[in-house]
Amino acid sequence: MDQIITAVIAIVGVPLVLLGYIIFGEQIIERLPDSLQGWIRPYFWALPAIGFAGIFMVYPLIRTVILSFRNNADTRWVAWDNYVYFFTFPDTLTSLRNSLLWLVFYTFFSVFLGLVIAILLDRVRYESLAKIAIFLPVPISAVAASIIWKFMFDYQAPGSPQTGTLNALVGAFGQQPVPWLVNSATNNPALIFVGIWSITGFCMVIISASLKAISTEVLEAARIDGANEFQIVQLIVTPLLWPTITVVGTTMIVNALKIFDIPYVMTSGAYDTDVIATQMFRQLATSHNARAAAVGVVLFLAIVPLLVVNIRRFQQQEEQR
Amino acid sequence: MSEVFARVASRAIAAGLGAVMLVACGGGTSGGGGGSSTDVTVWSAWGGQELKAFQNVLKPFEEKEGIKVHLTTVRDANQLAINVDAGTSLPDIAPGPSVDKVKDWIDKGVMKPIETALGDKFNDYIANTYPALTTASGDNLYIAVVGGKHYELMVKTQVKGLIWYNKKVFTAAPPKTFDDLLAIQPPAGAKLFCAGFESGDASGWPASDQIDNIIMRQSGEKVYTDWINGKQKWTSPEIKLGYQTFLKEVSSANVYGGPNTALSTNFGRAGKPLFASTPGCLFLEQATFITNFFKEDYPNLVAGTDFDFFAHPSLNSQYDGNVNGFYDNFAMYNDTPAARKLMQYMATSDAQQIWVNAGGTLGAIKSLNYTDPIFKRAAEVAGTAKNLLVTAGDFMPSDMQHAFWKSLLNVTKNPASLDSELARLDQVQAAAYKTS
């Protein structure tokens, strides 16, 4: 009952308070001299948004950075101890390595395949059907996708019927089943593959939209000048798509660094499959808040430059319009 | 069963389903009785079936004594400690705290002796209850025996480390020693053991149960408890020997499908090959809850006729009395007439019989009636126990526990990595037990 009351207050009360703030505030501002009105009004309107962002984003960020330099109980400064732990402990180093693997392979293959598929499908009659098929995994939640693939990678004792699709296939060729998610040589590629499978459709759709925007006249002109199709893709289409590819690529890098659900659901980080985000969760789950904060800060610092690149791109595109 | 529930619950929270926590937040506080002889406040962490069983236990007490029991489900194990630290009101009766707080709370007089609560019925309680739950040489914080006094009233118990088998396949007498067990020749095509260590984020815990049962019987309760408390190095000969013995259970020669199958199989499905038309293995080590999974896979199986278990065989006859298990207890935090009455009632076989009838558990009293043949047998195992030793990982700091589980997966996969895994565990141990 208490929770319902709280929910009603939150849903009805908060907008009411904001509305009251605007109505009463405006009444006060209107009584001010005109020159002052023009100066104060934008700040007055922006204040609630800035306030929310400050309380829910900036403040936690600052607290996280501070906590990462303190002991776990938050009573004492420990300088770089939490970071030293992160960069020296074997488990966290493994997670760092794996995140790097994700960053390189997940980003490259999802963008590359997205590009290739978009270009190829642009030239066939059954384009929308094929696009739907490729896009289908995107709306599936990553947890569900991971569970689906956990079944696909399933391993049963050699000699008994293989319920996992992949091992059934391997068995059809008379080979021994492969413990995909246990074997260190196959588990990280398997997880990254699931990531690529679930995101390629997204890359394809964005790139394809931008591909449609390339005027056919440019392509016609190139053909008349004697360019073959490979040259057109290589010399005309790809350069024209480059801004889009950069945006998609940086988004995928951010995704790769933040990836959590797939490793968590499929292996829970066992057999050296932890990534930075699962490591952060692990530290939190074992009550090492300060260490988790340090991992969070490292992850944040890794992502910031990419966000800057992305925002610059958007601004450039806005200016071009 | 509560242990399994706890794991499921912790996984649910881990998965981001905060529902369980929301329930805890709604708990609220309940005032102390203030010497009441008509009202008693009780906290427990139980929900679902277990809560229902407890309510059934309380009903006859309320009717007979005319005392109103105010029962609150408090899932957050820390809530009691928060109240103790803050000096706010405590429930009259609630489970004892985590082991690290027992001594402190007794010194502060937070927990009242069971001797006080039970009065002249105390001697009956000691005589009726499994000795492993009440007797200690010196202090034993796990069962809250300090300075010769008892501070936790034992009401339920469970034993683990049972070796399950298909009665149609294994017909010989149970092996006496672990070597006898390893020497048994499985039928053609089958291996000695089945195993399943996969359990999501908690993967490895079934393996930890196996090694717990080895170490406590191989090197004794002193080494075992020191090991839990971070005072026994992982690289020490005793723990290393435990790992080596465990590796015999999961070697390619002895485990169904080889180590990769053990690692890829969920603990609940591990027993399936026991009952296959051509059996894949002879034995599966697990607690009593596994029978539910047996019946899920093969609904027609009958406990006691189709499958049964024997107690973990001996590794060192000196330590045969060490049995792995867990127990539920209540401590008295406010000494009121009503609280004393309820404590006295919960120590009776009338009360515990109601618990036992609800199924899924053993009582703490030796002479209860079990309709389920499995629990009847489990009660015999509990009766032979000299020390009922807790599951090691559950009482280690959580990063130690996680590293422990992970190490078992890694050595199962690659036995050659044993030394480096143990060295890494020492590294974790050095950091995990520090309070910072």
Image: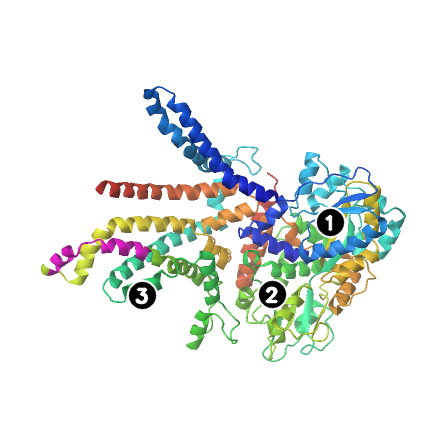
Residue under the point 70% across and 56% down: B50
Q: Distance between the residues labelled 1 and 3?
A: 65 Å
For residue B119, side relative to residue A198 (left or right): right
The picture places residue B431, in percent across and down from the top left corner, at: 58, 44
Q: Is residue A110 above or below residue A29?
A: below
Q: What residue type is labelled 3?
A: Leu
Q: Which of B252 and A71 is in front in this view?
A: A71
**Magenta part of the chain:** A203-223
Residue at the outermost right position:
B120
Mark 2 belongs to which amino acid? Gly
Q: Which chain carries label 2?
A: B
> In whole angstroms, how far apart are the C-alphas of marks 2 and 1?
29 Å
Please, what secondary structure does the residue beneath circle 3 have?
Answer: helix
Whether B320 is among the magenta residues is no
Residue A216 vertical placement versus A154 (above, below)? above
Residue at (41, 23) in percent of width and height: A28
Is residue B390 visible to us here? yes
Where disc 2 sits, the SS reads: helix
State which chain disc 1 sits on: B
Q: Mark 3 points at which residue?
A: A129
Question: Is residue A205 highlighted in magenta?
Answer: yes
Residue topped by disc 2: B268
Q: Do residues under tags 1 and 3 come within 8 Å of each other at their CB atoms?
A: no
Residue that carries the numbered disc 1 in the rendered image:
B142
